[in-house]
Image (tube, helix red, strand yellow):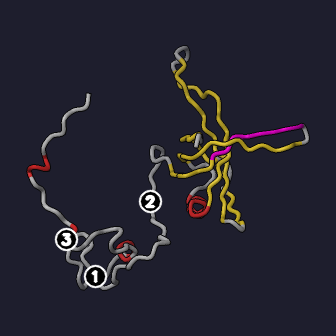
Amino acid sequence: MNDTHVTVVGNVVDSPRRVSLQNGAVTNFRLASTARRFDSQTQAFVDAGTFWVDVECWNDLSGNVSGSVSKGDPVIVQGTLTTHSWEGESGRRSTPRIRALAVGHNLNRGTGVFRRTRSERSAEPLPAGGGDLRGDDLSGEALTEHEAGLVRGRDYETAPETLHGVDARDLTAEPAHV
């Protein structure tokens, strides 16, 4: 219960490696996070120490990371910090490791395009001939690939009963907590 949860911002320093095992798939990569500080003498930012950490991603995250992340990418990794230990030629060795729960590109350093993976849950796909996705009348129009991949009841609620009116009593201000 006392897991150490961390969020690390850094750069991928090697190509992610995906391996299929009996109990699932794992993708591993190494991450470098270099702190920067302002040096008042030189009036410039300088690099401080670099934190090196191995990252492991399991199952669905494994496939998504191996298909999305490359060497050099700026990423944000959130997960559980552990220590990986082994016996080496010079004795007991160890290195920090993050078992990732989430990995994403650092959008402070660039742009990204998100594509949702197909869900394992069973749901009714939208009909290819149309439907009311956003309240627009798309009847008779071909859906885009993105719209066709949406799942009724999960991505968009289209039935009128899913909408509700606003009552002025719902808009009363909540008291401030002191």
The amino acid type of the residue labelled 3 equals: Glu
User: What whole-number distance in Å separates the C-alpha atoms at marks 1 and 3?
Assistant: 20 Å
Name the residue nearer the viewer: 165 or 14.
165
Quarter occupied by the N terminus: top right
Q: Provide residue 176's location: percent of width, then percent of height.
A: 21, 32
User: What whole-number distance in Å separates the C-alpha atoms at marks 2 and 3?
Assistant: 33 Å
**Which residue is depicted at the point 63% across and 41% down?**
32
Q: Is residue 9 visible?
A: no
Secondary-structure class at tag 2: loop
Tags 2 and 1 in contact by the CB under 8 Å rule?
no
What stretch of residues is rendered in magenta? Answer: 91-98
The amino acid type of the residue labelled 2 equals: Val
User: In the shown orientation, is residue 93 left or right of residue 139?
Assistant: right
Q: Provide residue 137's location: percent of width, then percent of height.
A: 20, 77
Magenta stretch, main secondary structure, is strand
Label annotation for residue 130? 1
Quadrant for residue 80, please give it: top right
What residue did someone put label 2 on? 113
